[in-house]
Image (cartoon, rainbow, N blue to C red):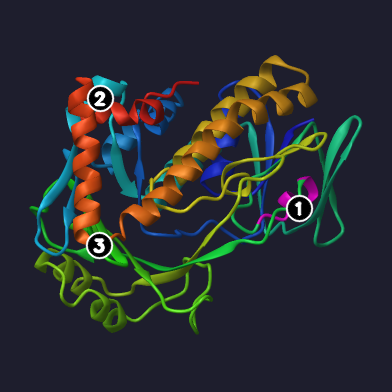
Amino acid sequence: MPVIIVGGGVGGLSLALALAQRGVVSTVLEQAPALTPVGAGLQLGPNAVRVLEAWGLAEPLRDHAQAPLRAEVKDAANGRLLIANRLGSDAEARWGAPYLVLARSALQAMLLAAVQASGAVDLRFGQGLVSARSEPDRAVAVLDRGAEVEGEVLFGCDGLRSRVRGVVDQPKSPRYTGQTAWRGLARMGPGSAPLVEVWTGPGRHFVRYPISHGLMNMVAVVEAQGGAPGEGQSESWTLEGQGAELMAAFIDWPEPVRATIAAVTNPWRSALFDRAPLGRWTRGRISLLGDAAHPMLPFLAQGAAMAIEDAEVAARLLCDSDPRAALCAYESLRKPRTTKVQAWSSRNARLFHLPSLVSAGLFAAAGGVDRLRGVDPEARFDWLYGWTP
């Protein structure tokens, strides 16, 4: 029987491709009538790029992704450089693969093309899931029209609001962080510096990086007042916001920040929620992958990367073990790592919004500790970017 994959986003397509590379067939059930571009840009650390290249995607990555030279964090109050991490050729030399930035739609398109070319994936659109169940010899997906799909195992790759998650565990209610995130694409013209730039300040921070010639990705996060999302906010990346409201939040920030915001035509906004790690990912022949298993805040830029890592590990184990044993091993291998990434993401949410003197002191202290230990600042990321399956 095939592996059932619920969800055709980055996580679901990654798992389908990783299985197809090993001759394992899968059925992907996607509730949307067609795959459409969602989101703006994303960052892929060497840990994820290494896996994508092993799946045969090195050439499309070269065609559609950019390799920034550095990641720079600056104080928005005075423009002071707080810390810079070398990327570009240094990242490839240290971690064995480049650090890349690209449009989320480009990654989705290259995964979809590879899945369709494999001949091992039955991709079904308009298939809304109602429930799923694990039986001794199979997993079953129950669809919204009453049809059932059987498989060897079932993976919930259905994102932040996963239906499969409720079959496996009962998570705690998400906690509103008090933050609103804005995303958008800005036409800046040619010649944009190949950098990931972060400006930090009290209650706000701003990120930008070029994802193609003349096209800049923007992420801006603002702390809101009150204990609940404001009117017109939801946890959705398809909700349009008002550029004037975004500009007002950063009107006194450096010119590059204001120029980027001014060049964004249709920003999207989302209320950000934090979630505690799940107690379990697996029940019988059903497991979770990507945001369904470990939703995290975007402040370490590892959401897509963790789904790609999950897919590679799950595919390897399913080829080598009894299905139930494979799912248990998958959870035991992946859960400690993704829990650590979740914790670092939450920590960065606080660090980026501290008063200038405090954040400058913390960044300087981190660099000083590195120098005292006689190691490069990039060594702090060896555990993250140096991962291999």
Numbered marks: total: 3
Q: Residue 118: in sight, yes or no?
A: no
Residue position marked by numbered label 3 in the rendering: 355
Q: Secondary structure at mark 2?
A: helix
Instruction: Name above or below for residue 346 compared with residue 322.
Output: below
Do callouts 1 and 2 mark residues in contact (Cβ within 8 Å)? no
Q: Main secondary structure of the magenta part?
A: helix
Q: Residue 266: in sight, yes or no?
A: yes
- Report the residue at 38% width, 70% height from top: 223
Question: In which image quadrant can residue 205 be found?
Answer: bottom left
Query: Which of the pair 81/9 is nearer the observer?
Result: 81
Q: Secondary structure at mark 1?
A: loop
Q: Nearer the viewer, mark 1 or mark 2?
A: 1
Residue position marked by numbered label 2 in the rendering: 92
351 on left or right of 113: left
Instruction: Name above or below for residue 158 compared with residue 341.
Output: below
Q: Give whichever of discs 3 and 2 has the lower sequence position.
A: 2
Whole-percent x and y of residue 149?
Answer: 82, 45
Q: Secondary structure at mark 3?
A: loop
Residue position marked by numbered label 1 in the rendering: 170
Question: In which image quadrant can residue 194 be found?
Answer: top left
349 on left or right of 134: left
Whole-percent x and y of residue 242?
Answer: 34, 81
Which kind of residue does numbered mark 3 sit on? Answer: Pro
- Span highlighted in magenta in the image: 162-168
Query: Which of the pair 180/184 is nearer the observer?
Result: 180
Q: Nearer the viewer, mark 3 or mark 1?
A: 3
Query: Which of the pair 122/372 is nearer the observer?
Result: 372
Q: Give whichever of discs 1 and 2 has the lower sequence position.
A: 2
Q: CA distance from mark 3 to mark 2?
A: 34 Å
- Quadrant occupied by the N terminus: top right
